[in-house]
Image: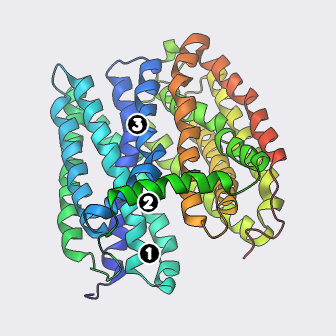
Amino acid sequence: MKKRNPWGWVPTLYFAEGLPYVAIMTLSLVLYKQLGLSNAEITLYTSWLYLPWVIKPLWSPFLDLLKTKRWWIATMELLIGAAFGGVAFTLPTSFWLQGTLFFFWVMAFSSASHDFSTAEFYTSALDQNQQSEFVGIRSMLYRLSTIFGQGILVMIAGNLQVLYRNNISYSWSLMFYGVAGLFIAFWLWHSYILPRPGKDVECDSSIQDMFDDIIETVKAFFRNCPLREILIGISFMLLYRLPEGLLSKVSSLFLIDAPHNGGLGLSPQEYGLVQGTVGVIGLSIGGVLGSIAIGKGGLKKWLWPMALAITLPNIVYIYMSFVLPSSLVVISMCVFLEQFGYGFGFTAYLFYLFYYSQGALGKTNYAMCTTFMALSMMLPGLFAGALQQFVGYRFFFIIVMITCFLTFIVSALITVDSEFGKK
């Protein structure tokens, strides 16, 4: 294997990993809202884009049959760039909705494949010490890509709308063309800089072997624990984040919706600052502090504080929906508080997935857990917009707070070793 300095490829690889996910889950919301789709349509269409991550454990093993992880990383980056270009090309056309949704689907499957290949390549290209050394770096770069995507790119689209006299389609199209160019640069760079580890080889298994392995993985997951514990574990994976699953997409739409519809009417530039920058910083700080807390006290000690943190700050949206504050400082503080609580509380969820996946089949069990993790956001999102349109923003946010009781119930049902999570 030709030696490559990990500093030359780990940061750029994880920055590239975060951008398409942000585009699919966040930029699409702002884009479709500005283009006039209803909240019900937006949340329905964009929630289905979680599907590639839901079924990833079922199809990602087949990637090993064709090429190496290095090849898949580079190829998916080129395909993601083409998808961004496709979104940009179809936006000014009469079939913009069908066209952009098609290319967002291409981007979603490419991004999920890139995620899988990146994680596998990281472990094969670096030794244990290097993997530990770069854990913080890769997490930081992923967060920076989130800030860049939700913050800077939305601001750029907003500024282009000012420059081109509110031509929304053309402005977003230019921005997406720019991101397409960025991914072509990622493709060229990673095609050159990524090492060729000896462990990164094509699998010699047959397709039938892969099918058998997948079936056995699913069976092993459901044989991992007694039936009662399995049902409790799956309930926790699906319901712990239910309030956030309802809130995540509608909260963004609330921030940019017009005041006469009950929203705050933020411009793209203001949204990019509030949600895409201040909110992501709050989310990141909450996640870091959550990891430190569990490292010192263990998951069992911090489970209930984190369950409260992921739910109670949602009340800021009830406050904003009734008061409709015009101060960007007040709105930013509310979003920061809610996102900080989510980041802190989500740590308990991730650690529970690690706890549930312990054992000889830990890796395959964790892959199955990520299916339920994606479903926990996909399923509520499918009807969240329709529910909001039916009851209005104020009562919708009240309903979100009521569903917090389900978070508390599933948190009370699970059992965790008191030492798990401690360093």
Query: Dot 3 corresponds to which residue?
Result: 49
Residue at 67% in and 48% down:
341
Q: Are marks 3 and 2 in contact (CB under 8 Å)?
A: no
Q: Residue 124: x and y, percent?
A: 40, 77
Left or right of residue 355, residue 114 in this image:
left
Q: How far apart are marks 1 and 3 (CA)?
A: 27 Å
Check disc 1 and give the amino acid type: Thr
Say above or below: 206 vs 259. Answer: below
Q: Distance between the residues labelled 3 and 2?
A: 20 Å
Choose top left, top right, bottom left or bottom right for residue 344.
bottom right
Check disc 3 and give the amino acid type: Leu
Query: Dot 1 corresponds to which residue?
Result: 123
Q: Are marks 1 and 3 in contact (CB under 8 Å)?
A: no
**Position of the C terminus by quadrant:** bottom right
State which tag comes first along the sequence, 1 or 3.
3
Front position in the image: 58 or 422: 58
Q: Label 2's element?
A: helix
Q: Residue 272: x and y, percent?
A: 42, 41
Left or right of residue 208, residue 78 in this image:
left
Residue at 44% in and 37% down:
271
Check disc 2 and give the amino acid type: Tyr
State which tag comes first along the sequence, 3 or 2.
3
Front position in the image: 58 or 344: 58
Q: Are marks 1 and 2 in contact (CB under 8 Å)?
A: no
Q: Label 3's element?
A: helix
Q: Label 1's element?
A: helix
**Position of the N terminus by quadrant:** bottom left
